[in-house]
Structure formats: C-alpha cells, structure tokens
C-alpha cells in the first residue's frame, strides 16, 4: 500500500483556531454543568462560608 497524503496542510493558524475552539467548548461545558446542578454550587458556597468562620 502507498503512503497516504491528506488533502490539507496543518498550519499554525489552523492549530490556533482548533485550540481556541476547544477552550471555548470546555468553558461552555463547565458552565452548563454548574447550571444543571445548582444544588452543588449552593452546597459549595455553604461549605466555603462555614470554613471561613472556623
């Protein structure tokens, strides 16, 4: 079998776009996970406040 050559070239510009998109997707997923479980955020806030008084 011959060597495969893809029909595109990976450039620094493309890598920059991919990393930017990945970062934004990660932020969206993190925010949506917190919003879907508000009780976790509330519990963490309560623990944080409690530990600051101890």
Image (cartoon, helix red, strand yellow):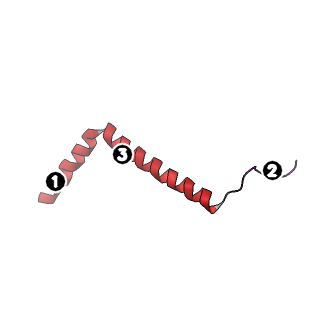
Left or right, residue 51 beside residue 39: left
Residue 32 lies, in percent from the top left, at 37, 41
Seen from the viewer's position, the closer of residues 5 and 46 is 5
> Is 40 contained in the magenta span?
no
Q: Quadrant of the C terminus?
A: bottom left
**Element class at badge 1:** helix
Inspect this view and state whether residue 54 appears: no
**Element class at badge 3:** helix
What segment carries the magenta color? 1-10
> Is 7 contained in the magenta span?
yes
Left or right, residue 30 beside residue 8: left
Mark seen at residue 31:
3
Residue 21 lies, in percent from the top left, at 51, 51
User: Total label count?
Assistant: 3
Magenta span main SS: loop
Gap in Å between the C-alphas at discs 3 and 2?
40 Å
Q: Earlier in the sequence, mark 1 or mark 2?
A: 2
Gap in Å between the C-alphas at discs 1 and 3?
22 Å
Left or right, residue 52 beside residue 22: left
Residue depicted at x 84% and y 52%: 3
Callout 3 environment at 10 Å: few (<14), some (14 to 19), or many (20+)?
Answer: few
Residue 44 lies, in percent from the top left, at 24, 48
Callout 2 environment at 10 Å: few (<14), some (14 to 19), or many (20+)?
Answer: few
Residue depicted at x 61% and y 56%: 14
Callout 1 environment at 10 Å: few (<14), some (14 to 19), or many (20+)?
Answer: few
Residue depicted at x 33% and y 37%: 36
Q: Which residue is mark 2?
A: 4
């Amino acid at each position: 079998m011959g060597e495969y050559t893809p029909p595109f070239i990976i450039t620094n510009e493309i890598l920059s776009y991919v990393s930017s998109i990945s970062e934004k997707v990660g932020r969206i997923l993190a925010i949506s996970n917190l919003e879907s479980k508000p009780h976790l955020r509330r519990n963490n806030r309560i623990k944080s406040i409690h530990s600051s008084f101890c």
